[in-house]
Every structure is written in structure tokens, then in C-alpha cells.
Amino acid sequence: MISFDDAQKTVLSKKLETTPTQIPLLESIGNFYSADISADRNYPPFNRAAVDGIAFYWDGISPVKESYQIAGSIFAGEMWQKDIQAFECVWIMTGAPVPKQLNMLVRVEDISAQNNHIYFRKGLTFTRMQNIAKEGEDILKDTVVLTKGMRITPQHVSTLASLGYGFVPSYGFLTATILRTGNEITEPSTDVLAAWQIRDSNSFTIRSLLKDYPVTINMRSAQDTMEALVTQIEAGKHSNILILTGGVSAGAADLVPEALLACGFTCHFHKVEIRPGKPIWFGTHPTGCIAFGLPGNPFSVQIGVKVFVEPFIRACFNNRDKTFIHKILTHERLKKISFDEFIVADENIHGVCVKKHNGSGDISASLSSTGMIRHQAQKEKLEAGDTVDYYPWMINW
Ligand SMILES: Nc1nc2c(c(=O)[nH]1)N[C@H]1C(S)=C(S)[C@@H](COP(=O)(O)OP(=O)(O)OC[C@H]3O[C@@H](n4cnc5c(N)ncnc54)[C@H](O)[C@@H]3O)O[C@H]1N2
Ligand code: MOO
């Protein structure tokens, strides 16, 4: 048996090469940058009016004049071409370029206009460059704003569009086949079930956890026979990643490890010191296919994806972000087994607290939890106030 840390290292060391490509902006969300993203010009590209009002020049020393003569107006999409005299001002609209020679912008609400002159509201105070967004103050030309390997997220879209990235340097999709195994497993849509039949949940769990990753997923299923397993593994190994569920522990019908070997896969580990999820199998094929044999129990599948498959996929796209964050445990916890334990947990304003369930076969194990925590193998006891690794269920982009 291998430790959790060694198992994770082994998985990450087998990361696949992915192909850089350009993807239309909106389709690139969830993908990863295959190159640094930089600014093609200063942002704002000119001194930009931040409010609707009047612009004029003030030296910052002598008192601001009582009134200024209106020389014209500037709308967004226009550039002021004429000179402006010391006693003159211009109407200017939000988003318009403030002429270089002007350094003051007063809101329309703070002035009144009469006979082609403006007058300031009583008691106004003035600061140079007020209400003017200075050229380059957001991003200077050639600055790298997002780096290779980062996840492309909805919050980047505004900046990417502004910088002209209608197409984003990202990666071509990986392909994955999910192969669910087990004589008892039926389609979830099956209405009438024999007592021994179990609706498939695992393949849905895997698809939902990988939904926003650049991975195209195919589905397969096999009965617990060598023939059926070999046929389906042979078909599935044309994908980059093959994820099996069930049939990896010690029973007479647990033929997945043997079938994978028969199909030419090399085993890098079988069984990891974790609970749940211990019987997990991991191997590679000479064609490059990577196989994860996840245990059949529904909660083990959630864990297998969170701690092995997701980090593996991220590594393939050169992403180094952790899939967990640090949280404060709100109560003490004694170790139940000398392995690394993953326990469903609920996040609250004080930190996280673990939730009870009936083991990894409990289909409701993760309901009313927001994620899970890791209780490390070496720690006999976690104290209230200890920092723990917390894996949120909701994708942490
Ligand atoms: N003698 C031993 N027995 C078991 C061991 C062991 O080390 N020695 N390990 C236990 C652990 S831990 C786990 S986890 C399970 C995993 O077993 P398998 O991977 O062989 O999975 P199955 O036996 O095929 O199924 C287990 C359980 O999960 C249900 N299942 C399977 N596929 C699905 C699916 N697609 N959707 C929903 N539920 C599914 C299946 O019906 C079983 O109830 O083994 C322990 N035994
Ligand atoms: O991995 Mo098993 O899920 O501990 O029951």
C-alpha cells in the first residue's frame, strides 16, 4: 500500500501533454491559459472622464475662477482638437478623452450654466485631476496581467475582452471515458428496480465534478466479467483518461485490476492509505492513456475525483492551484484509523465542522455538507482551532 502523498505525487508525475490552441473568449471559460496575457496599450488609453461635467485647467495654486466660458463639448468617441484658453472650459461626457491640457473635471451636479458660462456650487473644494482616470493607471502597455497555467474564469472576461482577446490562448480538450462496472448497476432513469439493482450515480458524480474542465467525456458500462471489461477497456483506452468505478477491491467479482493489466496497462499503485477510497487503482498504458480505477462506493468516488482526478487534470493544463484551502476546524477530532481520512464537513463563519454519515456507501454522505476535510495520517488528534485542508464541493476556480 502507498501513502496518500506518494500516491498524489505518482499521479501528478504522469501528467499528459496538452495542445495549445486559440479558443473563442466565451468558450474558453474553465480552460487554462497556454500563454501569458498582456496589455496591447495603456488602460485607460487616454485620460478618461469618469463623470459627466465640465473640464478646465487649474494650476493648483491660485484660486479657481468663479466662472468659465464654455468652449464646446466632447462626447465619448470624440477627440478635442482645438486649443482651450485659461478662462475656458468644455462640457465633457463620461468615457470621453479629457484634452491633455486640462486637469480638472467637476460634476454637472456641482455647477450651473448661464449665458455660455458655468458657475460652481458654493463651498466646492477642488483637487487636481479630480474625476479623471489617468492614462495607464489601470494597466500599463505590455504588462502581463494573467499568466500561463491560470484558470480562465468569468471574472477575467471583462479584462480579456478589453485587451482584445476575442480568442484566448488556451488548450485543446482532453478526452475521458467513464466506465462504470457492476452487474447490479442500472441507468438512473430505471423506474422499476429489482431489490438487488442499484441506480448508477457514480458516472454522474464524476461528470458533474469535471463539468467545467476542458475535458470531453464519453460513457461506457460493463458487467463484472473479464470479457465485458476487456472489451470496454479496449474501447475506452483511446481516450486520454479512463475512469472506472467499482470492481477494484478484494471480491471474487472485482476483476477491474486484472482486466486493466490484460489490456496492457501498467499498475503504478493499487490501494492507498486513505479512508474512504482505499482500493483505488492507478496505471498507464503505452499508448498514453491514464487509468483511474475508483472504488464503487459513491462517497469514495467523490473523494477519488477531488484528490486525484481533479489535481491530475489541472496538472495536465499546467495549473498549480491547490484544490483545497485552509480552514479552521471548530472542534476536536480523534483519529479513527492510521490512514489519511477524508470527512464531509460544513463551512460556517467560524471555520469548518465535520458531519456524520454511515460510511462511503451512504448515498447521502455529502448532502448538507459544503466540502470535506483531510485528517492527516500523522495527526492522532485534531484540536479545535487547528488549520485543516478543506476541499469545497463547489469548483474553486
Ligand atoms: N475484503 C475486503 N472487502 C472490501 C475492501 C477490502 O479492502 N477488503 N474494501 C472495501 C472498500 S474500502 C470499498 S470502497 C469497496 C470498494 O469496492 P469495489 O471497488 O470493488 O466496488 P464494488 O464492490 O463494485 O461496489 C461497491 C459498492 O458501490 C456500489 N456501486 C458500484 N458502482 C456504482 C455506481 N456506478 N453507482 C452507484 N453505486 C455503485 C456497489 O453497488 C456497491 O454497493 O469494497 C470494500 N470491500
Ligand atoms: O474506500 Mo472504501 O470507500 O473506505 O469503503
Image (cartoon, helix red, strand yellow):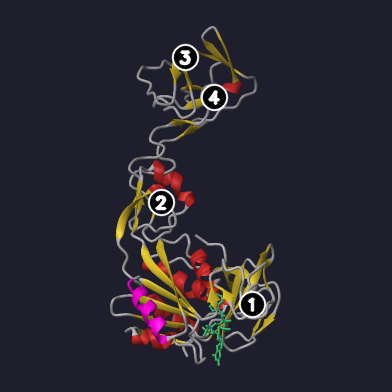
Mark 2 to mark 4 CA distance (whole Å): 42 Å
Residue 319: which numbered mark, if any? Answer: none
- Does residue 306 appear to the left or right of 84 in the view shown? right
**Quick check: 284 above or below 89?**
below
Mark closer to the chain start, 2 or 4: 2
Residue at the spot of label 1? 362
Q: CA distance from mark 1 to mark 2?
A: 36 Å
Q: CA distance from mark 1 to mark 3?
A: 79 Å
- Viewer-nearest residue: 224 or 116: 224
Name the residue that disc number 4 marks.
106
Which circle, 4 or 3, is nearer the viewer? 4
Which numbered disc, 2 or 4, marks the residue closer to the eye?
2
Tags 1 and 2 touching, CB below 8 Å: no
Front disc: 1 or 4: 1
Disc 2: residue Cβ within 8 A of ligand 1's nearest atom:
no
Residue 75 position in % (x across, y down): 44, 22
Q: Nearer the viewer, mark 1 or mark 2?
A: 1
Q: Could you tell me what secondary structure mostly forms the magenta stretch?
A: helix
Instruction: Please tell me whether mark 2 sits on a helix, a strand or a loop.
Output: helix
Q: Could you tell which of marks 2 and 3 lies nearer the N-terminus?
A: 2
Q: Which residues are magenta?
A: 226-238
Callout 2 touching callout 4 (CB < 8 Å): no
Sequence-wise first label, 4 or 3: 3
Mark 1 or mark 2, which has the lower sequence index? Answer: 2
- The quarter of the image that holds ligand 2 is bottom right
Task: Give the amino acid at mark 3.
Answer: Phe
* Tag of residue 27: 2
Q: Residue furthest top?
A: 115
Residue 234 part of the magenta segment: yes
Precedes in sequence: disc 1 or disc 3: 3
Q: Which residue, given by chain and number where applicable, does mark 3 sit on?
A: 87
Looking at numbered disc 4 in the image, what kind of residue is underneath it? Answer: Val
